[in-house]
Structure formats: C-alpha cells, structure tokens
Image (cartoon, rainbow, N blue to C red):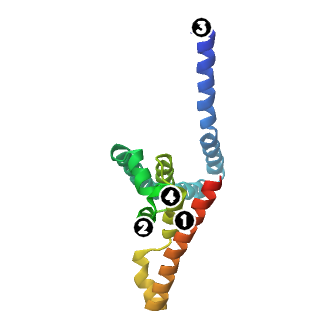
Amino acid sequence: MTERSQAARLSGSGRRIGRTWIFPAAVLGVYGMLYLMSPHKTGLALKACARVGLSLAVPLAFVVVVLFLLNLVVRPSHVSRLLGERAGAKAIALSVVAGILSVGPIYAWYPLLKDLKEHGAADGPMAVFLYNRAVKPFLLPVMIGYFGWPYVVVLTSLMILGSMVLGQGMQVLARKH
C-alpha cells in the first residue's frame, strides 16, 4: 500500500468519526450556551436528562445481555425452526406468550427483534410479539376492578386473536415484497 493511499484511507475514517460526533457536540454546545444564560434551569434539565439516561440503561443493558446469550446459544437454524415461516402455530403461540410476558420499553426490544430477523425469524411472529406487548398481566387485576371479568376476558381474547390475524397479514405482505 502506498503512502498516499494509506493517508487517504486514514483520512476517510477520521472524517467518518468526526461526523459521528457532530450531534453530541452540537447538543453540548447548546447546553453550554443555555448554562451561560440560565445555570439553574440548565442544571435541572441536565438532571432530568441523566434520569432518563439511567432509566434507559437498565432495559438496554438487559437487551444487550440477552442478545449476547442468544448469539452464544441460538443458531440460525434454531430461530428459523421456532420462528420461521414454516414454524406455523408453534411460532405464533411462542410469540403470543413472549409478547405478553415481555416488559420494559418497546424500543429496547427492537435490537433483539432485528437480530432474530437476521437469524431467520418470519415477519408474522414478530408482528404477533409486538401486538401482544399491549396485554399486560400485571394490569389485569386493575382492569378487572374497573371493568369486570367479562370485559377483560373478551378484550384480552380479542387482542390475542387480533394479533394472530395481524401476524398472518404481515406474512402475506412480506411474501409479496
């Protein structure tokens, strides 16, 4: 490799790293200017930002650990067997249960779903999972208290059935594209 091509390669990666830091640097600059104008309010805003960051750290760390463990244990053949297009009712049932039992903010699950998709998971089971995140077992007693057993049983059943219909629709749309 010539000296010129090596320098060009290094300057290209330096430019890429520089672009990565534009937004954080701009945010830091805005906070700096705001601090000069109103130190107290800026301090409160930074504390609120830190609280949000800390509240996101736990779910995101959990997802990173789950992804790490999945990559150690689960092979693409396992994913395609359990959640692939040919898995059928087993994939749907697994997605329903996983969606209902999943906790935390939805955006924390996106990296995991992307990883499953890359390992062969079909679109239908992933849609079923996302839809069933709306069914929250820990809120069922509160719902029963407000609305009664019949309403909660019918609503929850319809949500689960609706997720299955949505999952089938996603499978059909995914095949067309």
Which residue: 60% across, 61% down? 172
The x and y percentages for residue 165 are: 56, 71
Say whether disc 1 or disc 2 marks the residue closer to the N-terminus: 2
Classed neighbour count for the residue bearing mark 1: other residues with Cα under 10 Å, few (<14), some (14–19), many (≥20): many
Kindly identify which residue carries mark 2. Answer: 93
Quarter of the figure with the N terminus: top right
SS state under label 1: helix
SS state under label 2: helix
Kindly identify which residue carries mark 3. Answer: 2
The one nearer the camera, 50 or 3, is: 3
Circles 3 and 4, Cβ within 8 Å, touching? The answer is no
SS state under label 4: helix
Kindly identify which residue carries mark 4. Answer: 52
The x and y percentages for residue 88 are: 46, 62
> Could you tell me the amino acid type at mark 3?
Thr
Q: Nearer the viewer, mark 4 or mark 1?
A: 1
Task: Kindly report the distance in space between the C-alpha atoms of the residues bearing marks 2 and 4.
Answer: 34 Å
Say whether disc 3 or disc 4 marks the residue closer to the N-terminus: 3
Q: Which mark is residue 167?
A: 1
Does residue 109 appear in this view?
A: no
The one nearer the camera, 3 or 30, is: 3
Say whether disc 3 or disc 2 marks the residue closer to the N-terminus: 3
Which residue: 40% across, 47% down? 77
Task: Kindly report the distance in space between the C-alpha atoms of the residues bearing marks 3 and 4.
Answer: 48 Å
Classed neighbour count for the residue bearing mark 4: other residues with Cα under 10 Å, few (<14), some (14–19), many (≥20): few
> Could you tell me the amino acid type at mark 4?
Val
Say whether disc 2 or disc 4 marks the residue closer to the N-terminus: 4
Say whether disc 1 or disc 3 marks the residue closer to the N-terminus: 3
> Could you tell me the amino acid type at mark 2?
Ala
Which residue: 43% across, 70% down? 100
Using the image, determine if residue 114 lies above or below residue 149.
Answer: above
